[in-house]
Image (cartoon, helix red, strand yellow):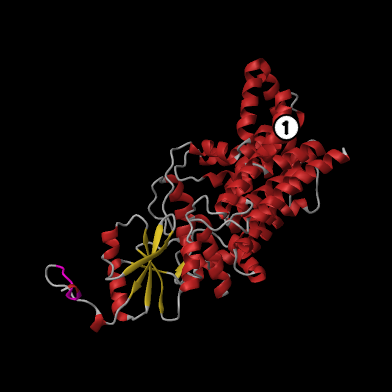
């Protein structure tokens, strides 16, 4: 047993280390990561720990600040880099891996706990979010901590777990808001309805009144301060983000992006993507067992075992809640994966089929290997990404004191904001003309869409020189001539210097 444990621990550590290393080599690609990274950078730069800022002068009301606090703190310790901003998500994932291991060991045994941890960390969404600047990992840690604590307390554990239940609630409320209450409330209520006779008395083990007061003391001060500092926050965040967003698939009230209009029920397809490859293989195995006449055995084991039924309702809760919502993302699945992983971990530890025994080892490394290859290919330039890192770096290395700021026509990508430390500008063509009139620079650095035809590029100025391009933009250098030296054009478009 010890040798087997060491082997699986070595694989688990190798997977986590591969993600740890990859965080430093993969640039921020639009739009999610650089958007949140720039918000955290502004928080660290301004020292404003109450209001996250979308850009100077524009408060970000879309999310509470827990993830931004962690990322801004990492910037203070490690400096501004992809690694520092992703590091908090890696630590959060590490904590969730331990919670998965702890709950699986409580319900079954160490072998199931080993497999559950490995399954969880090698699911597609888990592996990606472990090294990504997102808020979802912090929400998932909060909901996982609350639900794991609840299950352990109902099973007879006491002490710190009674209070960690409420700490998880506070983390969820400070990472994504009231949604956390729904994602823990739905599985707890469903489970109590299934097994209320055996468990209703166990609810007294939780210090409800003191725990709720403790949660309020953690959470309410920030919500109050945020509303006082930027009035309108509570209406936008509570009503807009938590009611209108889910009732209206094409909700146009999003101040910071666009609605993610998806077909109703798409959240179940997202589950297949998020749990890849384990979810697909487990469903196939379950379907085969079901049609081979084992359905009664499957149902009886699920209903009769309180631990299994709790895992099942906890795994299903996010999909059940978002089934009728049209405004969804695949990252909404993350709170489901710890409990999905334990159910699949039990199956993986006990599967007797020869082909499954051979297959499960390959499944454990499939996602890490594929994503590591993708990161490596992207770092070598083989795979083009939607990032402005290279373009901004070129500008920063070549500009002089007499050159213009970096200007993007019509649309400023989030990655350009982040990598320029907030100095890149967004302008229209008419705004650029006015800017050129008001300020005299030796060179103008202007990024325009890559698909602009030559005549449209030429219309910007008398002389333009394309110095580089990436997947979306071409960087132009415009030579600004003194007014008395600029060639004039006659009515037919012929320049005076050509006569």
Locate residue 215, reporting x and y percent: 66, 58
Residue 418, above or below 208: below
Locate residue 377, reporting x and y percent: 57, 50
In this figure, which residue is indicated by the disc labeled 1? 348
For image coordinates 80% across by 46% down, the residue present is: 157
Locate residue 237, reporting x and y percent: 48, 58
Q: Secondary structure at mark 1?
A: helix
Residue 469, above or below 335: below
* Corner quadrant of residue 467: bottom left
Q: Residue pushed farthest top?
A: 293
- Please indicate, yes or no, whether residue 369 appears anywhere in the rendered image: yes
Residue 358, above or below 113: above
Closer to the camera in the image, 223 or 465: 465
Q: What secondary structure prevails in the magenta region?
A: loop
Question: Is residue 422 toward the left or the right of residue 2 in the image?
Answer: left
**Residue segment shown in magenta:** 493-497
Closer to the camera in the image, 403 or 86: 403
Q: Residues within 10 Å of mark 1 (few under 14, many from 20)?
A: many
Q: Residue pushed farthest front?
A: 499
Question: Is residue 433 toward the left or the right of residue 282 in the image?
Answer: left
Locate residue 367, reporting x and y percent: 63, 42
Q: Residue pushed farthest bottom?
A: 484
């Amino acid at each position: 047993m010890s040798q087997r444990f060491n082997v699986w621990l070595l694989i688990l550590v190798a997977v986590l280390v591969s993600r740890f290393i990859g965080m430093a080599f993969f640039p921020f690609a639009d739009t999610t990561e650089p958007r949140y990274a720039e918000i955290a950078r502004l928080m660290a730069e301004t020292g404003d720990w109450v209001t996250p800022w979308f850009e100077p002068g524009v408060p970000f009301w879309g999310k509470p600040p827990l993830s931004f606090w962690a990322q801004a703190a990492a910037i203070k310790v490690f400096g501004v880099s992809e690694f520092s901003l992703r590091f908090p998500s890696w630590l959060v994932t590490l904590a969730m891996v331990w919670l998965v291991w702890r709950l699986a060991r409580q319900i079954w045994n160490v072998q199931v706990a080993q497999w559950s941890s490995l399954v969880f960390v090698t699911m597609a969404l888990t592996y990606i979010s472990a090294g990504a600047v997102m808020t979802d990992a912090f929400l998932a840690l909060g909901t996982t901590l609350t639900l794991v604590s609840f299950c352990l307390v109902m099973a007879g554990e006491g002490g710190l777990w009674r209070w960690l239940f409420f700490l998880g609630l506070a983390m969820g409320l400070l990472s994504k808001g009231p949604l956390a209450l729904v994602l823990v409330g739905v599985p707890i209520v469903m489970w109590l309805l299934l097994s209320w006779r055996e468990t209703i008395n166990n609810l007294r083990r939780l210090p409800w009144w003191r725990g709720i007061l403790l949660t309020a003391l953690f959470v309410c001060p920030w919500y109050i301060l945020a509303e006082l500092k930027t009035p309108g926050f509570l209406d936008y965040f509570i009503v807009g983000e938590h009611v209108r967003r889910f009732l209206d698939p094409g909700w146009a009230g999003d101040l910071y992006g666009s609605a993610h209009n998806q077909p109703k029920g798409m959240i179940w397809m997202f589950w297949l993507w998020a749990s890849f490859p384990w979810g697909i293989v487990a469903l196939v195995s379950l379907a085969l067992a079901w049609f081979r006449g084992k359905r009664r055995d499957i149902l009886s084991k699920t209903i009769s075992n309180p631990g299994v039924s709790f895992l099942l309702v906890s795994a299903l809760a996010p999909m059940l809640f978002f089934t009728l919502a049209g405004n969804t993302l695949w990252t909404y699945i993350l709170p489901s994966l710890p409990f999905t992983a334990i159910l699949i971990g039990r199956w993986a530890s006990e599967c007797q089929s020869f082909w499954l025994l051979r297959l499960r080892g390959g499944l454990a490394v499939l996602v890490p290997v594929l994503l590591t290859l993708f990161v490596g290919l992207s770092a070598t330039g083989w795979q083009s990404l939607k990032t402005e890192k290279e373009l901004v770096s070129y500008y920063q290395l070549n500009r002089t004191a007499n050159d213009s700021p970096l200007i993007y026509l019509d649309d400023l990508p989030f990655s350009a904001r982040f990598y320029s430390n907030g100095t890149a500008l967004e302008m229209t063509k008419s705004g650029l003309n006015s800017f050129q009139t008001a300020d005299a620079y030796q060179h103008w650095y202007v990024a325009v869409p890559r698909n602009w035809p030559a005549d449209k590029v030429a219309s910007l100025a008398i002389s333009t020189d394309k110095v580089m391009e990436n997947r979306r933009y071409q960087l132009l250098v415009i030579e600004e001539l003194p007014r008395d030296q600029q060639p004039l054009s006659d009515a037919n478009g012929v320049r005076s210097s050509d006569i």
